[in-house]
Image (spheres, helix red, strand yellow):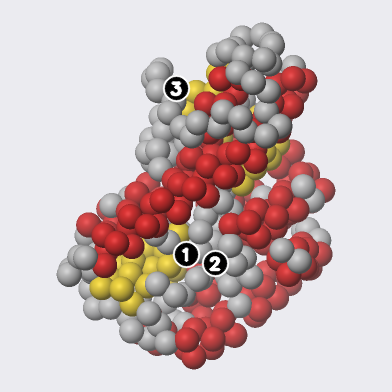
Amino acid sequence: MRKTLVALGVVGLGIAGFAGVGTPGIATAQEVQGPEITWRMSLWGKRRAFTEAPEYVSKMVSEKTGGNFDIKLYYGQQISKSKENLDGISVGAFEMASFCASYHPGKNVPLNVLDLPFLPLGNLDIMRKVHDVIYSHPASEKALAQWNAKIYMSMMLPQYEYMGRGEPPRSVKDFEGMRLRALGGMGDAAEKIGATPTTMPASEVYTALQRGTVDAIGFPYTYTFAAYKLDEISDWYTTNMSLGTVNCPIVFNSDAYAALPDQYKQLLEDVRDGAYEAQKAAYAEKDAINVAKWAADPKLEAIEIPEEEMAEFRRVAGKPVWDAWVEANKDKVPAQELLDLVLNTAAGG
């Protein structure tokens, strides 16, 4: 049964983003003619580096259509809880949303291959190639079709690290007994070293860490820690674990997308490269700010786990977790094929 969706709040948001004028492959301002269409996109939290991709898309489609195609961004779970965005898409409560596959893995099993720990996704360019090839796989399209959803692009997230309170872990062994916010396969990896993983949406992490419900939060380095103000209440953060990441695609309601005129569909395709570049630039900018800020903060300690210990952690919690995922899902999806596709695409990256 579909969960009851949060009532729609009527809020006008000012859209500010990257300039994008002169972006290759995009028509000049107001050149794309078409009817007046308004879409709503459900997001959570506040505007941050993670959301610069939809900010860019919203700005550019409005600019190129003279305001006729308007994508309104609703932050702060105004029109849906973060864990219910896919439900909202399925019933047409809004036309566009982001969701993280690890929040509800049973709903989109093929996508969860991207959430496995220690995948060789060395940078955001490789990550985009890998995500694109998995998102376009027939198994992924079939899984999302059950939710009346069409994947548009990935809202890429950098590699995860931990930030926490209390005594800093100076070795992998020190994580034993700790309660960690660790999503997807990173949760399985945490169990391999004696930690207790828990899944919670990003909107709940500040309170959980502040109250001691968890000892540390696994988040993309560095911007997300700062975006959710965890650096203000934490004592330490790791710098070299590169635990993996989670995938959070932008999806369209399939019926809404099908009803778009062809020129608007093409425009969405045309602005996608610029959206990825805008997000990458935002991450780089925030990382530079946060690294300098944290280095100057005497209350916040940077922790580097010895590389020989990380190599052992990757050995016991990398491929064994991958293989366990394949075994658990081989009768549901072409699991080994999907994993091989990730590894081969990354290797050719």
Residue 42 is left or right of residue 45, and the answer is right
Residue occupying image coordinates x 77% and y 47%: 136
Circle on res. 61: none
Query: Residue 303 in the image: x percent, y percent?
Result: 33, 77
Give the residue number, with chain letter if any, for mark 1. Answer: 160
Residue 300 falls in which quadrant of the image? Answer: bottom left
Q: Secondary structure at mark 2?
A: loop
- Contact between labelled residues 2 and 3, with CB atoms less than 8 Å apart: no
Residue 346 falls in which quadrant of the image? Answer: bottom right
Question: Which amino acid type is marked by label 3?
Answer: Leu
Question: Which amino acid type is marked by label 1?
Answer: Tyr
Q: Which is nearer the eye, 210 or 309?
A: 309
Residue occupying image coordinates x 69% and y 11%: 33
Q: What's the distance in space between the residues labelled 1 and 3, CA to CA?
A: 33 Å
Q: What's the distance in space between the residues labelled 3 and 2, CA to CA?
A: 35 Å
Would residue 32 be seen by someone viewing this image from the given angle?
yes
* Mark 1 burial class by Cα count in 10 Å: few <14, some 14-19, many 20+: many
Give the residue number, with chain letter if any, for mark 3. Answer: 8
Residue occupying image coordinates x 76% and y 66%: 348
Q: Which is nearer the eye, 301 or 17?
A: 17
* Mark 3 burial class by Cα count in 10 Å: few <14, some 14-19, many 20+: few
Which callout, 1 or 3, points at the residue further toward the start of the chain?
3
Q: Secondary structure at mark 3?
A: loop
Which residue is outermost to the left?
A: 298
